[in-house]
Image (cartoon, rainbow, N blue to C red):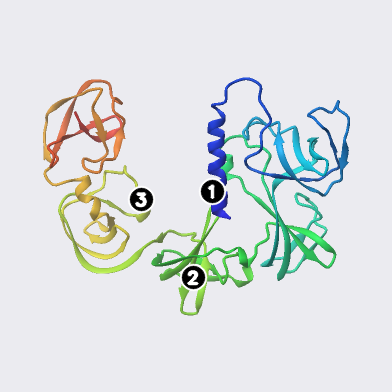
Amino acid sequence: MRWNKIVAICMTLLALAFSSLIIPGKVDAQKPTFFQHLYLLKDAKLYNGKSTAKKTVATLVAGQVLTIVETDQTSFLDKAADWYQVKTWLGNKWIKAEEGMLYTGNYSKTDQTITTVFDAELYDYPGATAAVDKVAPGKLHAVSLFNYRPPSASNANDLIIMNDEHWYRIDTAAGKKWIRNPAFLESVKKTPLAKKIKLTGTEISYPIPFVVESKAEKIEPQIVQIVGEWKVGLGPNEINWLKIRLPEGDRWFIPKQPIIDDYQELNESLTLQSETRYFEQLQDGNQRNGKTNWLKPGTYEAFESSGDFVHIRTELGEVWVNPKRALLERPLGIIPTDERIRLTKTSSYYVFPATGEISHQTGFYSPQAVLAFEKWISPSGTVYYHFRSFAGDEWVTL
């Protein structure tokens, strides 16, 4: 379901981009790209056209799911549609949207058993706010699904961060009822993983990837084996459940403390040939800036690693370094200089001389003379100068 949403978002954004190419003029009705159905919360009158002045053709009774043919909405980023053309037994007809009348989304029939984890409140229809009853955790038979989507969004970013509402219609002793966003075991989509991580703080774990307080157990800092993960949501709403293997059995948790990923214990020497950036915290190691902490060349004791980063013991204490980047950030052959160089409109600026990471776009600085304090000539013969600017130290090719 997560990938289906990503695909839907991408298709919608493409549709919005191409919609800007439409030649100005009369705007025709369009088929919505982000939802295909609506649930009638109130009775609705049918019309042959988009005008209440026209004669009413018939009246639809509340409680029906209708397939949308067109709307008068010019863009999903525009205000919600006022008119919806829907499929009926009389053919395609129009209904006038009124406050509290429609619940938009995507409807589908299903025939599945879901095993709920918590009590589930029962509702008479999707979008309802007042529950009529509830059912205890257990197996339920679902007959249909209604995924709510809002009728419009204020900006394209809302398409990514908005939360869906998933409504399942189930069989109950009181007849068919709806439940909202149920947590059920069959929804877990575990991706297999095989790697070690190091927990740096106490975490709370559960036997299943749901926060069941009665089943919570603490996990103290230690090295653990990851056997799977389950990512829920998108963007800032994404939650990443990790499944770990412990002597007492597998457990799930959401990391709340920093973890050392791709972990490996080491007992070896590490030789750094050039000055190398170091970090006191591993999570700071992916920053391109923070170029003030440089470790002198030498041989150090390495005792653990995380991907390309290695934890070493130095006279400064235990620090993290990235040996694979060391000779790119400070390549061999850098020499001091006091040359005065001239920046031009075609000068290129870099964070480091051999990583290719751009610090500023060409032409960022106006033509001027600056004093370089270091330079490096690449194997291809390109000369890089190190100079100081108001934005910090950076490298330039003239």
Above or below, comparing residue 110 to residue 106 in the picture: below
Q: In front: 264, or 24?
A: 24
Question: Can residue 11 be spotted in the picture?
Answer: yes
Label 1 packing within 10 angstroms: few (<14), some (14-19), many (20+): some
Residue with the mark numbered 3? 284
Foreground tag (3 vs 1) = 1
Which residue is the site of mark 1?
6
Could you tell me the amino acid type at mark 2?
Answer: Ile
Q: In the picture shown, does residue 52 fall above or below 176?
A: above
Per the rendering, the mark at residue 119 is none
> Is residue 78 left or right of 55 when viewed as pictured?
left
Q: Distance between the residues labelled 3 and 1?
A: 30 Å
- Is tag 2's residue or tag 1's residue first in the polypeptide sequence? 1
- Number of labels in the image equals 3
Contact? badges 3 and 1 (CB < 8 Å): no
Q: Earlier in the sequence, mark 2 or mark 3?
A: 2
Q: Position of residue 56 (x, y in %)?
A: 88, 33
Q: Position of residue 288 (x, y in %)?
A: 32, 44
Q: In which quarter of the image is residue 280?
A: bottom left
Q: For the residues marked 2 and 1, what is the alpha-carbon distance in whole angstroms?
A: 34 Å
Quarter holding the C terminus is top left
- Residue lying at 26% horizontally and 40% vertically, measured from the top left: 356
Q: How crowded is mark 2: few (under 14 residues within 10 Å), some or many (20 or more)?
A: some
Q: Can residue 157 be seen in this view?
A: no
Q: Is residue 119 left or right of residue 386?
A: right
Tag 3's secondary structure? helix
**Residue under numbered circle 2:** 219
